[in-house]
Image: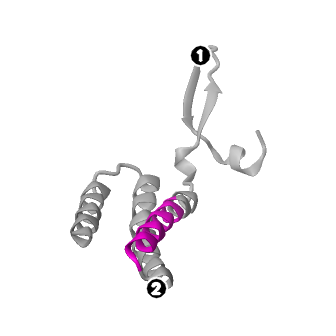
Amino acid sequence: MMIKKVFMAGLMTAALAGCAQTEGQQRATTGALVGGAGGALVGQAIGGNTKSTVIGAASGALLGAVVGSATTPQRRGEQLCRYQDRYGRIYTAPCDDRYYNGDY
């Protein structure tokens, strides 16, 4: 019965993984899936019972989600800067090379 619940939880997580919109969310979800599976295997190998398997899966999923979201690369186009035109209007746009070179 416990295997059925774990399988259904994994299936629901995998289904929701396709709904993630940003790359960071997708990497966090993938990390949680991989970490949860690895944690369950390690928990079963160390403890040999259901409790240790569940603890290992939860710990692995949490660690996998954190590592997945922390390792998401930042793209240059995602950073927005504030500019002011010659008429005094302020607008936001992707930062240009002066921002990345420190010449702003």
The prevailing secondary structure element of the residues shown in magenta is helix
- Residue drawn at (50%, 60%), measured in percent from left and top? 62
Q: Nearer the viewer, residue 29 or 42?
A: 42
Residue 72 lies in magenta, yes or no? no
The image quarter containing residue 48 is: bottom left
Looking at the rendered structure, the secondary structure element under dot 2 is helix
Q: Nearer the viewer, residue 55 or 63?
A: 55
- Residue drawn at (64%, 19%), measured in percent from left and top? 86
Residue matched to label 2:
45
Q: What residue type is labelled 1?
A: Arg
Q: Nearer the viewer, residue 11 or 91?
A: 11
What range of the chain is rendered magenta? 49-65
- Residue drawn at (38%, 73%), measured in percent from left and top? 50
Residue matched to label 1:
89
How many marks the image carries: the answer is 2
Question: Residue 23 in the image: x percent, y percent?
Answer: 43, 55
Residue 57 lies in magenta, yes or no? yes
